Amino acid sequence: MDLEARSLQPSIKATLLAKLREYKHYLNNLKTDVKRITSTDTNQAARDELLESGIDGTTTVSADQKGRLLMSTERLNQSTDRIKESRRTMLETEELGVSILQDLHQQRQSLLHAHSTLHAVDDNISKSKKILTTISRRINKNKLILSSIIGALILAILIILYIKLVG
């Protein structure tokens, strides 16, 4: 019809093409309605069929479902127990780690105290060494002075004896 309307004279052609578009639109609406109506019947029939077959197999399906549910529950309980045991082990490990860290902290503090004490002792030893070196120098200086005085006295005694004996 579309081809025939296009081949006609221009004055008739415009009105026929407009009517043709209206008819096509109307036809498409009718097709959509038919599809909707037939699909509703099909869906209803499918629903009815499923419900009838479900009623017959309810006892076997529910027993099977109960078995699977019991197995799943048992697995879930076992997993929960394993998680609780893992959590307990984790807490024990954490407590042990905290205890070890506290011991290490105390040992570190002891080592730092020993280190500072060692530095203080080292400083004191250095000061003592300087003092002993100074004392040793003074002793040597005093020995030299004392030896000089003894030598001078011996020389003076010898000079006095020589003068008295010779003179």
Image (cartoon, rainbow, N blue to C red):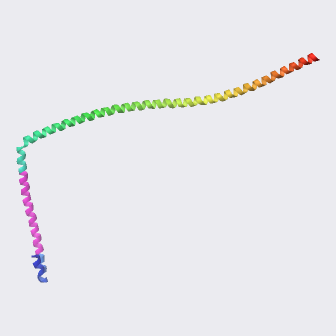
Work out whether 91 lies above or below 35: above
Left or right of 115 in this view: 83: left
Work out whether 55 lies above or below 8: above
Q: Where's residue 146, x and y in %?
A: 78, 23
Work out whether 78 lies above or below 156: below
Question: How many numbered markers are drawn?
Answer: 0
Residues in magenta?
Answer: 19-48
Q: Residue at x 7, y 56 (%)?
A: 42
Name the main secondary structure of what is drawn in magenta.
Answer: helix
Left or right of 100 in this view: 29: left
Q: Where's residue 23, x and y in %?
A: 9, 72
Of all residues, the one furthest to the right in this rendering is 167
Left or right of 80 in this view: 55: left
Does residue 20 belong to the magenta stretch? yes
Q: Residue at x 9, y 65 (%)?
A: 31
Based on the displayed image, in which of its 4 quarters is residue 118 positioned?
top right
